Amino acid sequence: MVLRLSTVLLLLSLVACGSGPTREATASRVGVDFSGQWSLDYGMSDNLQASLNVLVRELQRQAERRAQAAGADPRIPSASLLVGGTGSDSGSAIIGLAQMADLVSRSPLLDITQDQQGIRVRREDDFALDCDFHEGRPQAVETPLGRELCAWDGHQLVFVLSLPDGLGIRHRLTLGPDGQLLNIASTVSSDRVSQPFTLNRVYRRIEPGAQGFSCQQTLTRGTVCTTETD
């Protein structure tokens, strides 16, 4: 797995914690076929600013409840939630968490291959997600950045990347009932922020050569689709 330098620097600048799927994995799930090309549907996907506002409001409510329990005036804003503050739930930490979630989930196109040996999610302008199986079980991969693991959780496929100092990134893939929509919930967690931040990206299945996309066959990657530019 290869990360762009900017991604690596941002990953290592956060201190975080993550959790992974707990259910036993097998090589496939009946009726779940992620394979194919997928295009991001911006209208159906989460808005970054709206999701950030929801997180901030929840953290503010938590801070007010803690202040009430401690006998403080809940009408006085917590210093830890002021942008530019430091420590747990600081403004800079919250914004950094949201920026990380956006960075690792913004790919406009996906090219997914799936068979009994594994699943590979190639993402335009980002690193691929690989899920390799051996005797029906997922294999953890040690990378220079941390430990990578995938597993089935029911009919959802979960990728977990555990990085040094506890930074955690989780991608949860859910296929729609008709197989034409794919939701990827990307969650980033950090011990600098008391709540994880999740962005849902919705993708539509596309056919190679569809209007607005350019697809070509390659020897190493099979059919590769990219967005067309004028």
Image (tube, rainbow, N blue to C red):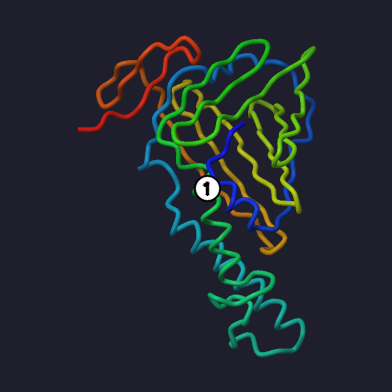
User: Most extreme residue toward the left, as rendered?
Assistant: 230
Q: Which residue is mark 1?
A: 199
Count of numbered tags:
1
Please state the horizontal and vertical placement of residue 108, each as a whole percent of the image.
Answer: 40, 35
Please state the horizontal and vertical placement of residue 192, each as a whole percent of the image.
Answer: 69, 64
Q: Quadrant of the C terminus?
A: top left
Q: Secondary structure at mark 1?
A: strand
Please state the horizontal and vertical placement of residue 43, each as a whole percent of the image.
Answer: 35, 43
Where 158 falls versus 96 (above or below)? above
Residue at 74% across, 45% down: 19
Q: Quadrant of residue 210?
A: top left
Where 81 falls versus 192 (above or below)? below
Please state the horizontal and vertical placement of residue 81, each as a whole percent of the image.
Answer: 59, 75
Residue at 77% across, 29% down: 140
Q: Looking at numbered disc 1 in the image, what kind of residue is underneath it?
A: Leu
Residue at 61% across, 38% down: 171
Q: Quadrant of the N terminus?
A: top right
Residue at 69% across, 27% down: 154
